[in-house]
Image (spheres, rainbow, N blue to C red):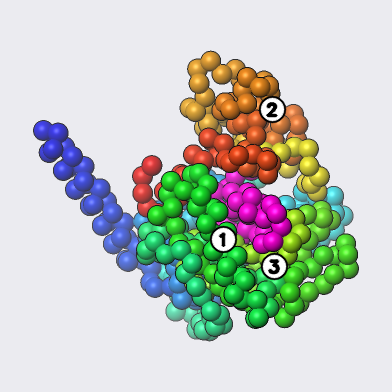
Amino acid sequence: MRTLALSLFVLLTLTTCMRAQTLFEQYFDRGSMRVDFVLAGNADEQSAYLLELRKEPYWGGAHHNLIDSLGYGEYRFSLKDKDSGRKLYSRGFCTLFEEWRTTAEAQSLNKAFYQSLTFPYPKAEVTFCLEERKKDGSYQPLMSMDIDPSDTNIRKERVQHYEVVKVVDNGDETTHVDLVFVAEGYTLAEMATFKADVAEMADYILSQSPYKEHRDKFNFWAVCSPSLDAGTDNPRKDEWAKTAVNASFNTFYIDRYLETNDVLSIRDIAACAPYDHVCVLVNSDKYGGGGIYNHFSIGTAHHALSKEVMLHEIGHGFAGLADEYYTSDVAYQNFFDLKVEPWQPNITTMVNFEAKWKHLLAENTPIPTPTNEAYANVTGVFEGGGYVAKGVYRPAINCRMKSNEASGFCEACQAAITRMIYFLTDRNE
């Protein structure tokens, strides 16, 4: 009887996978579609404006988990088959623009930021819908349009040729997580250094839990995009470099915050390989980085803490993890509404802690949990996180999402990263 039940389970699983694969093949073609647009506004209002549509040669994402079940991101977009109204694809994401909107500058200035989204190339006409998440957790439409994949004005240019190296190869991109590293601030003569830096970064990431337990599910790619100048911009020292994706320190006037608004150049370069997440590796020995969910992660290569920083930033960009620190200098103001449960899986306002890591707590763990030696290695509910000392809680006294001194990710962050790995590889936890 047990053997029969197991056989039925396997048959049901295979049937489900075959149905999903057929669904992908029914609605989507080879390659991906890229929507380039602009987000513009200020602290109080925003608008979205289409730039153009492009066809790119690779789709690195899953073929089965096409509908976002995680609910992460300050924005989300969806595709529906125009004829039937059936939802075909959806994803949540974040942007540098939404971070800027929480700064003091946004109170008195209008600004525009480039943004880019990709999805499998549709076979038939679809309706694209872009929405923003409001402070109360509800969504509001920003842009909607019908897309005809046979439109003659969809750009189908060949991607620019760069050397592409598959640094870690564990298999087909449709069933693995593909991390693509883009070179920034490496000259053509420094490409051997870039490839060695990516390999070193991959070795480190795959040595950390939970990545090491799932290392066979990852591919790492290096796209060798040369810069005219070595290094990157450092405005505080009046240092400027002509580089591939125009990265710069001092983003939002925070010295260590390394970012770029040139997301279109990043996408142009990353299009040379299939990807689930894009990382920008910067040829610098200065401390700094940044990570934005389903946008990209960026960090330097040659600081003593570069590997720890990149691991932290991939936590943001790949897994949607929040910062758990609350004492460091940031430009954000009132980033979290304490009356609403944040979507990030590793912080809570206690509005809906049941949906977070409560299941990981031991029965005798007090809530909130005291920040003392007795709970140093315990999963709990410690006050302070998300840039504020009061009202936001984190899962551990210390974690990679809180400081570089942490031994690694806390239990809740590891669970969230693992959930993302399985979501992108079409597997069950």
The residue that appears at 66% across and 62% down in the rendered structure is 301
Instruction: Tell which tag, 2 or 1, sits nearer the viewer.
Output: 1
Residue 299 drawn in magenta: yes
Q: Is residue 138 visible?
A: no
- Answer with left or right where residue 419 lies relative to residue 257: left
Write down the region rendered in magenta. Answer: 293-322
| Circle number at residue 86 | none
Question: Which one is earlier in the sequence, the residue at label 2 or at label 1?
Answer: 1
- Answer with left or right where residue 216 lies relative to residue 75: left
Q: Amino acid at mark 3?
A: Asn
x%, y% of residue 423? 43, 50
Please, is residue 349 above or below residue 182 in the view? above
The residue that appears at 61% across and 22% down in the rendered structure is 375
x%, y% of residue 165? 50, 73
SS class of the residue under badge 3? loop
Please, is residue 263 above or below residue 337 in the view? below
x%, y% of residue 37? 64, 68
Instruction: Tell which tag, 3 or 1, sits nearer the viewer.
Output: 1
| Circle number at residue 200 | 1
- Which residue has dot 3 on it? 283
Question: Which one is earlier in the sequence, the residue at label 3 or at label 1?
Answer: 1
Question: Which one is earlier in the sequence, the residue at label 3 or at label 2?
Answer: 3
- Which residue has dot 2 on it? 383
x%, y% of residue 293? 60, 53
Q: Quadrant location of residue 255?
A: bottom right
Q: Residues within 10 Å of mark 3 (few under 14, many from 20)?
A: many
Instruction: Tell which tag, 3 or 2, sits nearer the viewer.
Output: 3
SS class of the residue under badge 2? strand
